[in-house]
Image (cartoon, rainbow, N blue to C red):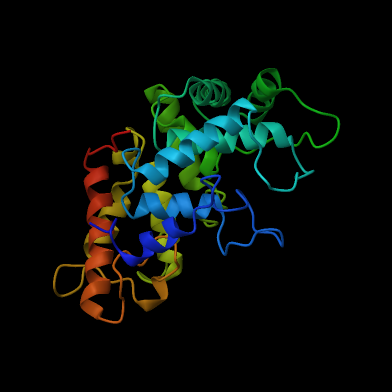
Amino acid sequence: MHKDGKWARQIISMQDDETMWGSFHSLSSANINPLTTEQALRRLQILGYTMEDECIQKAVRYLEDCLSGRKQIPDRTEKLHDWTLFTHMMFSAWIRRFTRANEAASEMARKWAYVVTCAFASGGYDNDAYTKAYTETFGMKAKGGRLIDFVQFYVLSLLVGELDEATERAMIRYILNKPDGIYYVYDGCIGKLPAVPDGKLVSRYLGAVEMLAEYAGAKEELSFVIDWLMENRNENGKWDLGKAAKDGVYFPLSDDWRRKETREADCTERIERLLNKLSGERRDV
């Protein structure tokens, strides 16, 4: 219902001839657009765009070309880790957030599933087992070979539907208790509810819960979030995260947030969608 709104039209109008939005992963002085391709894709997905839409089809084809080596993103190479592995992980994650039809992206998902399965083979997280499986699977370089933490947006996007039930549940419990949350999404402990039920912090917190809700084993582990959300409905039985929740990523959904009723409708729509996921409704990709 938000695909024809001004926010989506604005983003699509900025898509360049290469079907991207300038830099892919990070803003730099060379990027003439005020947002990256990742930011554009995340925002469009939140606004309801899927693989059925032309702008997403074009972007996914570009990502597939980058994953195969036929094209390269304009970003500067980062030296802190294996840049080839990191970019292939990013491309694969974003492709699979819209479609499972790309075999190279699926292979990347299977590799990460093997590493994470090894890490939780004992029932809890074993860092030595993780390091061993990671090194066997991806290798390590003398320079720039820092291990990539799996508790982050890209890997968790890849792992949906790839883990057995025991590994999935063990991983979710581990993530819920991790003090610094999910990298690129929320930097606090997800198992600890926000002190106040509104604002940008809560919006990011919900973003982390939404990621975990993609996993079949999340329903029982996240029941405390359901209780918290139900307790924080307003007198109308709806939710309002307040003006401060407007971050240009998750909100706004509607064109105008000057009216409280519109903001309340957006917040309620998002939370009801999350509650449906936690009740068993899964995203169809």
Q: Quadrant of the C terminus?
A: top left
Q: Position of residue 120 (x, y in %)?
A: 53, 26
Left or right: 236 in relation to 174: left
Q: Quadrant of the N terminus?
A: bottom left
Q: Most extreme residue toward the left, as rendered?
A: 236
In front of the other: 46 or 233: 46
- Above or below, 12 relative to 116: below
- Above or below, 1 relative to 156: below
Q: Most extreme residue toward the bottom, as rendered?
A: 258
- What residue is rendered at 39% in x and 37% in y? 98
- What residue is rendered at 20% in x and 73% in y? 234
Left or right: 210 in relation to 230: right
Left or right: 257 in relation to 57: left
- Above or below, 240 relative to 2: below
Q: Is residue 230 visible?
A: yes
Q: Position of residue 21 (x, y in %)?
A: 55, 53
Question: Which image quarter: residue 266?
Answer: bottom left
Q: Position of residue 278 (x, y in %)?
A: 26, 44
In front of the other: 117 or 94: 94
- What residue is rendered at 49% in x and 53% in y? 15
